[in-house]
Amino acid sequence: MISFNRKLSTKIKLIFSLVSALLLSCGWIGAGGLPLFVAFVPLMLISAQYSPSWRDTFRMLGWAALSFVLWNLATVWWVWNAAPIGTIAATVISSWWNLLAFMVFHIVSKYAPKGLAYVLFIAGWIATEYIYINAPALSFPWLVLGNGFSDDTWAVQWYEYTGVLGGSLWVLTVNVLALQALLTLRKRVWTAATLALVTPMAVSLVMYGINSPEGKRYLSREKVCVAAIQPNVDCYDKFGMSPLRLQEDIYAMLLEVPDSASFVLLPETSLATMLDDRNPKSSPVVHHLACILEQRMPSSMVVAGCESMRRYGAAKGSETARLSNGIYSDIYNSSIGVDSAANVQMHHKAKLVVGVETIPAWLRDTELVTVDLGGTAGQLGIGVSAVPFEHRGVKVAPAICYEGLYGDFMGGYVRNGAQALFVVTNDGWWGNTPGHRFLFAFCRLRAIELRRDVARSANTGVSGFINSRGDDISRMEWDERGILVSDIRLNDRVTLYARLGDYIGRIAVYVSLLCLLYFVAYRARKRFHLAD
């Protein structure tokens, strides 16, 4: 069992709880991820002092809730600009998972050997992250601990083997060792904590050098020229503007793209016309795009965001279909690839924004949690695959906005042959807040996990290019209008993480269950005096 004899006053406990919240927040407020390595220690010191009584358990619950709620509010407050209910819901749901993992550790630590409690803390926390990542209609993996290193890519080059959940494992392990070092003051524990902290960084720095764009680990030396367009259209005015005016603005910017570009990226929902999902070639917008390409860039492809509709008729063709005028249909947030011959490839967004694009099934008949951010509000159709677009032998991932948060999902494109990652997005709903900056920053982690260059086109910023080490090649900031052009390097190598996905999360779920079963058995043996 874990104990801490020094008596802490309520004031000190409050300070410790606030310090934990601050240290947890650093990776998402621009201060870097290094404070995460001791972020849980103040909270765990409070836990170590309390007795096993239910009264003390509820006291610990209060301190933990204060830390985790403040951590969530400090890092997702910007959602309030678009939808106040979004900030509240994200904070409540995310804090609940945080509390579940921490309080299970706290309770077990009072009745079982400390080794079991520590293993359960590490595995349980990662398990709740994994479950939250994959929760249907409720997923918001913003605060996965491994995401806290999006500005410290030099330290996490080994994400190509583990993904961001490997970063969570690193953070939690160092916190446990740091706590033990403080409680025991033993030199060997301090040494173990230091090695656990420093060794992954040293390995990462070596990998950073090996994975240079000119390094031997690239199986493909081919480059393609990509142009990323940032129209800088106010998203709150966009859907009230004339579709013809919006489209003409896009056409005008396309005419400024150098004819050397093999791919041209346009942001999420940049095409102002609803496309027929079964016959997108019939759209005048597609025809006009093909004409521009034929005249100026016959060897290029435009990858653009749009809305599309699939009509089913009188029968409900899917769980997400909506009924209008007696006709069932699905509306998708989509990306399309159009070439000069008007050939069209289409991808439907599979990872939808909670409350805006997807709603839990039991709430779909209400409007209580539906947030209208222009365009189509409510439950959208859900894409089911991560199939790359292919153009002249080059395969690229046509991801849309929120999908860039999901390493395993983006890995699906790589498993299907994608040689580079494209992301089209519209991040303007939150204004000039950390939201759009960190959506770009998280793409650095996808670049490392999958060892693919990333090209990103955002409506209002940040647009830019990221190489496979997570370095920014070039970027266009918030509230700028223009075109970025860069050569990006293609890669055919499939990383271990791309092959296996979030295997650390799956292992953590099983380890957590085994730990809980062992705890139950241990307590039963103690009750019958069969264990010391």
Image (cartoon, rainbow, N blue to C red):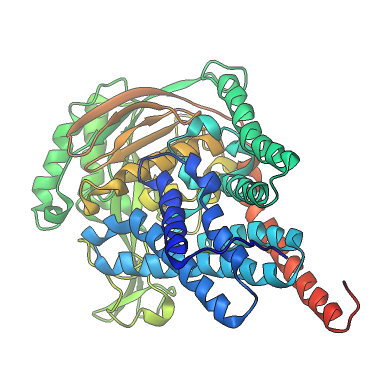
Residue 223 placement (x, y as % from top left): 45, 21
Residue for point 62% across, 17% down:
216
Residue for point 28% across, 70% down:
85
Above or below residue 519? Residue 253 is above
Residue for point 12% across, 41% down:
248
Q: Is residue 138 visible?
A: no
Above or below residue 73? Residue 137 is below
Q: Which quadrant would residue 377 be assigned to in this image?
A: bottom left
Residue 405 placement (x, y as % from top left): 44, 49
Residue for point 55% across, 63% down:
46
Q: Is residue 19 visible?
A: yes
Above or below residue 335? Residue 309 is below
Q: Which quadrant would residue 18 be assigned to in this image?
A: bottom left
Residue 471 placement (x, y as % from top left): 43, 27
Q: Which quadrant would residue 67 be assigned to in this image?
A: bottom left
| Horizontal side of residue 311 vs 150, given as left or right | left
Quarter of the picture containing the N terminus is: bottom right
Quarter of the picture containing the C terminus is: bottom right
Q: Nearer the viewer, residue 340 or 415?
A: 415
Furthest-right residue in this view: 530
Q: How many marks?
A: 0
| Horizontal side of residue 478 vs 226, given as left or right | left
Residue 133 placement (x, y as % from top left): 51, 59
Q: Nearer the viewer, residue 268 or 132?
A: 132
